[in-house]
Image (tube, grey):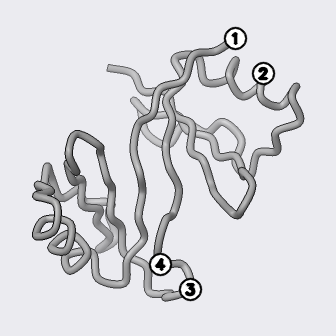
Amino acid sequence: MSKYKFDHIHVMSTDPEKTFEFYQNAFGATLVEKVDMGKGRYMLNVDLGGVTMLISKTDDEKKAGLGHFGMKAPQLQKAVDELKSKGVKFSMEVTKISPKLTISFLDAPDNIRVEFSESEK
């Protein structure tokens, strides 16, 4: 059976800076980096007490909130195949999104999305 490791929480916000300020003021979160996603998009990489929180912008208030949480799997395709054999449905097949990052998404109960990733160093 594949081994999984919690990786991050991804929050969608209509105002990422304001959202970050809330977590900074309330819990002492720190900004690790502002990641340029291209085409004017960006993501805030935040350390929230040792947990990575990613905050991205959405213009749709209905999409604000928890976007997904992320899990790492050292052999992503193997992990996806194992989960599919258990009846888990995937909304995004294994996809290489950059030279060092491959991801996949599954849909868990209660409209929760789970991202699985495998990264090369």
38 up-or-down from 69: above or below? below
**Gap between marks 4 and 2, in whole Å?**
31 Å
Q: CA distance from mark 1 to mark 2?
A: 7 Å
First along the sequence among labels 1 and 2: 1
Q: According to the image, label 1 marks what residue?
A: 1
Say few, some or many: other residues with alpha carbon within 10 Å of mark 4 (under 14 / 14 to 19 / 20 or more): some
Mark 3 lies on residue: 62
Q: Circle 2 sits on which residue?
A: 82
Q: Earlier in the sequence, mark 1 or mark 3?
A: 1
Q: Could you give the CA–CA distance between mark 3 and mark 2, rounded to whole angstroms?
A: 33 Å
Amino acid on which disc 3 is placed: Lys
User: Residue at horizontal 29%, vertical 82%?
Assistant: 15
In percent of the image, x 57 and y 16: which residue is there?
A: 3
Give the number of the disc on residue 64.
4
Is the residue under label 2 in contact with that under label 3 (CB below 8 Å)? no
For the residue labelled by badge 3, is the local secondary structure a helix, a strand or a loop?
helix
Return the mark for residue 89: none
